[in-house]
């Protein structure tokens, strides 16, 4: 398995295809419960621009995309309207005694997904190790949120070293979200 960063438009196309297969509205309740799910579908142009700004981490098995972990620099907040409430909330949260809005060296981990045939084989952990390695020079940590009902994803993020920063209910969707942080120095 090769852990690397996005380097061409075909890899972006593969990310979008894998995303489409794992978005919550196409999965059965059983698949959601046992395998996890994605909540955001990215616009191809926004995803391309995100990767031009800072390449995301991918796992490749030859030419096959086994997984991805999206690096979303904060300047992309307004490009993904469904995530605006998250970005607004992050402005008021603190990490290690400092408000996030006053701490420039972090980004939002925009989404992580491992292809069905590669789950349970260390791909998730490998992508986060690669993310720490490739982002450490520019960033101190990453922040993301995971729905509490996405048990598989929560367990995997905890195993990778993420710590809970904040938990909140979303009255609009009925989801309870955990805002979590991965410190690149630990």
Image: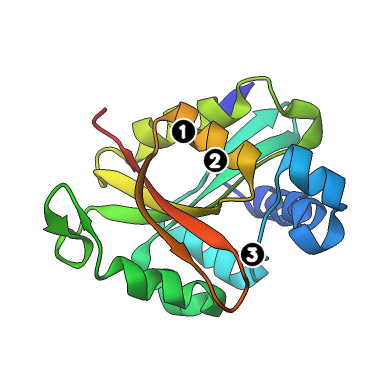
Distance, label 1 to label 3, CA atoms, is 21 Å
Q: Quadrant of residue 39?
A: bottom right
Question: Which circle's residue, 1 or 3, is located before the other in the chain?
Answer: 3
Q: Is residue 95 left or right of residue 60?
A: left
Residue 80 drawn above or below residue 104: below
Residue 40 bears which disc, if any? 3
Quadrant occupied by the N terminus: top right
Image quadrant in which you'd find residue 184: top left
Q: Residues within 10 Å of mark 3 (few under 14, many from 20)?
A: some
Q: Residue at x 70, y 44 (%)?
A: 36
**Which of 2 and 167 lies nearest the eye of the viewer?**
167
Question: Along the line of sight, which residue is nearer the eye, 31 or 129?
Answer: 31
Q: Tell me how the rendering is colored.
A: rainbow
Q: Is residue 81 left or right of residue 166?
A: right
Residue 185 appears in which quarter of the rendering?
Answer: top left
| Residue at 65%, 54% in the rendered image | 12
- Compared to residue 163, the image places residue 122 above or below, namely above
Look at the numbered discs 1 and 2 and tell me whether their residues touch, using CB distance below 8 Å.
yes
- Residue 154 tag number: 2
Q: Residue 4, can we see it?
A: no
Choose mark 1 or mark 3, whichever is in front: 1
Could you tell me if residue 52 is visible in this image?
yes
Q: What's the residue at 25%, 63% (across, down)?
A: 93
- Element carrying mark 3: loop
Q: Position of residue 32 (x, y in %)?
A: 77, 48
Which is more N-terminal, label 3 or label 2? Answer: 3
Report how far apart the C-alphas of labels 2 and 3 lie in the structure: 17 Å
Q: Which residue is mark 1?
A: 158
Q: Quadrant of the C terminus?
A: top left
Question: Residue 183: where, in percent of width, then height?
Answer: 29, 38
């Amino acid at each position: 398995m090769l852990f690397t960063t996005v380097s061409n438009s075909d890899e972006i196309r593969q990310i979008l295809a894998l995303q489409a297969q794992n978005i919550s509205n196409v999965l059965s309740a059983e698949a959601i419960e046992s395998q996890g799910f994605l909540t955001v579908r990215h616009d191809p142009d926004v995803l391309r621009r995100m990767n031009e700004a800072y390449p995301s981490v991918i796992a490749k098995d030859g030419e096959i995309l086994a997984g991805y972990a999206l690096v979303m620099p904060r300047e992309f907040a307004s490009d993904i309207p469904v995530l605006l409430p998250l970005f607004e909330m992050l402005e008021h949260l603190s990490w290690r005694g400092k408000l996030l809005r006053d701490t420039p060296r972090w980004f939002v981990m925009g989404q992580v997904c491992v292809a069905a045939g590669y789950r349970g084989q260390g791909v998730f952990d490998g992508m986060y190790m690669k993310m720490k390695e490739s982002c450490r020079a520019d960033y101190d940590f990453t922040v993301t949120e995971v729905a509490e009902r996405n048990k598989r994803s929560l367990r995997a993020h905890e195993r990778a070293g993420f710590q809970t920063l904040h938990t909140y209910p979303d009255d609009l969707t009925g989801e309870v979200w955990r805002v979590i942080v991965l410190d690149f120095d630990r």
